[in-house]
Image (cartoon, grey):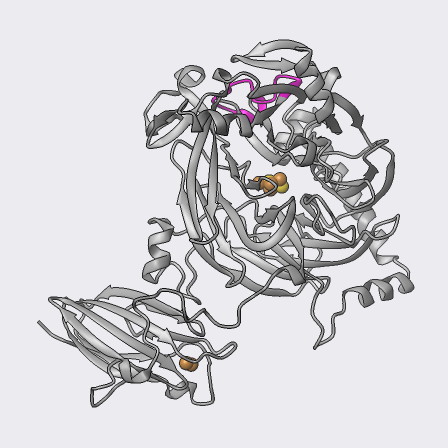
Amino acid sequence: MNKLLTALLGLSSGLLVSVLFFSDVGRQNARASTPDGELASAAQKVYVPHGKKDEYYLFSSGGHSGQLFVYGVPSMRQIRIVPVFSQDAATGYGFDDASKKMMGGYTWGDFHHPAISETAGDYDGQFLFANDVANNRIAAVDLSLFHTTDILKMPNMGGPHAAVFVTPNTEYIVAPTRFARPLGDEYAPLDKYKEKYKGVVTMIQFDRAKKKLNLAYQIVLPPWSYDLSDAGKKMSDGWVVMTTYNTEFATTNLEINASQKDRDYIVMVNWKKLEQEVAAGKANTVNGVKMIDPRDVEGAIYAIPVAKSPHGVDVTPDGTRFVASGKLAPLMTVFSFQKAFDAIAKKDFVANEFGIPVLKYESVMEREVDPPGALGPLHTQFDDRGNAFNTMFISSEVVKWKLDTGEVIDRQPVFYSPGHATAAEGDTAAPDGTYLITGNKIAKDSFLGVGPSHPESLDLFDISGDKMQHLMSVPIPPEPHYSQMVKADKIKPKLIYDKDETRPDSVWKADDARIERKGSEVHVYGVAMRSKFIFDAKAERKDSFTVRQGDRVFLHITNIDLDQDITHGLEVMDYNLNFEIQPGQTSTLSFTADKSGVFPIYCTNFCSALHQEMSGHLLVQPK
Ligand code: K7E
Ligand code: CUA
């Protein structure tokens, strides 16, 4: 990243390093000399005594860990890691049959941008959607169970980095691709990039009752790289805006070749128009998905020139404007939806790129905000008083500025190199204006050393006053990209799994535990309870069972302790198997008993004073 920026900013690496170095020394000194009164005020603001709970949940993307990190704000205590795209030994996620199937053969993912489901432009707290940039998947997490309920694999895509963003009523989950690829998993040499490779946006629908993601349709685009996107709201509802880079069509050495032109584009797409056309049967089918070319639909797609290689694009809470962050140009550009609509009506086009009308920059741009010395703007967040907050990756700071005038109100150092920022309810139609958190890529000297690689970190700011107050830094596992901060009372976690959910494999009474043999398949319908397993209620030793070598064993285990936080785990020794069963949950795990012998089974989750006694045996008779 540094190398890329160095090349593009025309600085020698030595100079850039020294710029960073000196600014960090300045920061360390500033921090060391913070007055005691200010430190005490910061400490008081983040201290949440036992018995009190945090005001907000922070749902932070786990990047290439593939998982979702859940924090409380303002204490910044990590409460939970929810496995989403990667296997998790502790819960058995990715090992039990249902989650294994959902993961589709992958064992990890690269999760960048969470999106909480919205109603009328506001987080409704029911579900959270996640993108896997590496393996072209979108996941849905049920926020009543903190459990991943569905994962959808998207064909024709090349890494949904500009995902996921929801439209104001979660009509669609929008997932634009990063890398152009030939459609339909076809082969085409890189020499044929401009003709054969395509950019794609996947529009996904979510069925809340069934908790299922569904591919609605795809939009085919020029082979540019789509970096970030956001959905319009209120007056701009129906539109999606996306930043692009590599409009140069470079196929090698992108750090130089994809930064040749002074301008790339913001692409504006009208999904409401496209939805109608798709419903009217105007789409092709590619690789089993309906695909529409927006150039065939009058008024469905436009491009707006923007300073080269922009990163984030964020729609303002009132939906009237969107802000593009320059990344390689040290400025934020505010664009007006009304101006764009007027320019479209007047056909104020300056060019036509790949069949897409290009609007005149000056006609759509409202202002450029260019704070002196602020370098590497990446993302924008908002408060409830008309202010915007921008992360500056290179100059390592947050800049607060007025949306209406561009006036810079405050700048605060970040420790160090922030990517995204997250304001409380900051990308909804009604931000709170209370806290802001930056997701930092570099920790350097912030924490006790842990070897050559340091943790990433989050910086918490109080943004309720005119000046931002830095409250604390906390280490976080890789990799904090985007996160969302939602009022705690919007999340309604369940204490136990619903008993009435249709789960044919559940056993609710210990006396009903049984073993059914179907040929070489052995189905164990068992229960876990304090402090024993019952696999077969009729057997002499109810907590053990015998199979024959080579049998396929299905463990269907129900946790019948319908009690808050009484979770059991089940491992099978030397079989490399472990899974968790939460209160009222039924989980199925299957394996082939290919080793003969005696294999102790025990509960892996400390559940009672007699947890150590919660055990049994799997006996595998040799062939
Ligand atoms: Cu980290 Cu949102 Cu993938 Cu910017 S992206 S930092
Ligand atoms: Cu059940 Cu420990």
Foreground: 228 or 297? 297
From what the image shows, is residue 417 above or below residue 377?
Answer: below
Residue drawn at 67 percent across, 54 percent down: 485
Residue 450, visible in the rendered structure: no
258 is within the stretch colored magenta:
yes
From what the image shows, is residue 348 above or below residue 8?
Answer: above
Foreground: 101 or 571? 101
Residue 366, visible in the rendered structure: yes
Residue 38 horizontal/vertical position (percent): 88, 61
Residue drawn at 21 percent across, 80 percent down: 545
Residue drawn at 32 percent across, 83 percent down: 510
Q: Quadrant of residue 586?
A: bottom left
Q: Is residue 541 left or right of residue 622?
A: right
Residue 120 horizontal/vertical position (percent): 64, 45
Q: Is residue 225 left or right of residue 290?
A: right
Q: Is residue 22 left or right of residue 164?
A: right
> Which contiguous range is marked in magenta?
247-264
